[in-house]
Amino acid sequence: MENLELQKHALEVRRGILTATHAAKSGHPGGSLSATDIMTFLYFEEMQNLDPKDPKKPDRDRFVLSKGHNAPGYYSVLAEKGYIPKEDLVTLRHTGSYLQGHPDMKHIPGVDMSTGSLGQGVSAAVGMALSAKIFGDSFRVYTLLGDGEIQEGEVWEAAMFAGAKKLDNLVVIVDNNNLQIDGPVDKVNTPYPIDKKYEAFNFHVINVADGNDFDQLRAAFKEARETKGMPTAIICKTVKGKGISFMENQVGWHGKAPGDEDYAKAMEELNKAEEALCQK
């Protein structure tokens, strides 16, 4: 897919994130926005055999949102792809809605794993990849972690196992925006150097200088697909709140929803961005 088309999809995903969290008056916009371009690339170019009309298609590539609190971004991507109606995004976190604060595989089409407890999603993804190896299935497994999330010990147990079992059908992606709920990641409990840690667990590691750039993402995922005999970790440097000027690199937007004024301002920025894309 052309980058312009991907940019248009990503813009719509950002609209959905803002609309959902504004309507819910809660949620996590900052990390959802930083990971928007990664998830857009996955769903609109990288992952194979996806069919919104057949969400459980056996040969589909799998995705696990290990940082499950980024559900607004996940739901918005699923809506943009056609798995769920876009109008349902405004029911985020409402009583009785199937779109709750964390993804639920029993109620949301297209969700391959229920997540929320940090560190557990990647373990499930490793299990899926191992299953594919055991049964000779060709699908690949992608999982997205937060850089704050990788402070969890379970993340490294999963990495040890994936490296030991040579799961080259597994791609671990770290959304490295360097901000978590309590502040800068390197000040709270530094996980750096992330790349060297994954290398120590027998991963092929790819560092992406700008995880919000589609050309760089395309090159990284191509390299991951061509890597044989070991799992891949793609460490993406991103910008928290990417795409909304007053949210970018601001830790306060980790788990705060936009109010009416902020929402209007953010949507105006996205409308201007859309106009600029239409002129390309």
Image: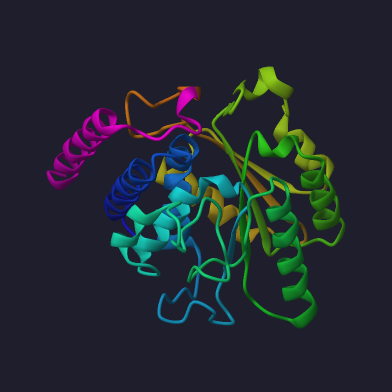
By what rule are the colours in the image chosen? rainbow
Query: Residue at image x 50%, y 51%?
Result: 71
In the image, residue 258 lies at what x, y percent? 35, 33
Above or below, 271 against 96 in this view is: above
Query: Residue at image x 56%, y 45%?
Result: 69
Does residue 212 appear in this view? no
In the image, residue 211 lies at what x, y percent? 49, 39
In the image, residue 95 lies at what x, y percent? 45, 56
Q: Find the magenta span and give its range.
A: 252-280
Residue 263 drawn in magenta: yes
The residue sitting at the top extreme is: 187
Q: From the image, give the main secondary structure of the stretch colored magenta.
A: helix
Query: Residue at image x 28%, y 61%?
Result: 87
Q: Nearer the viewer, residue 80 or 100?
A: 100
Q: Nearer the viewer, residue 141 or 55?
A: 55
Image quadrant holding the C terminus, namely top left
Above or below, 199 against 143 in this view is: above
Query: Residue at image x 47%, y 31%?
Result: 240
In the image, 264: left or right of 95? left
Above or below, 218 against 188 in this view is: below
Residue 272 drawn in magenta: yes
In the image, 3: left or right of 30? left
Q: Nearer the viewer, residue 8 or 124?
A: 124
Q: Nearer the viewer, residue 123 or 208?
A: 123
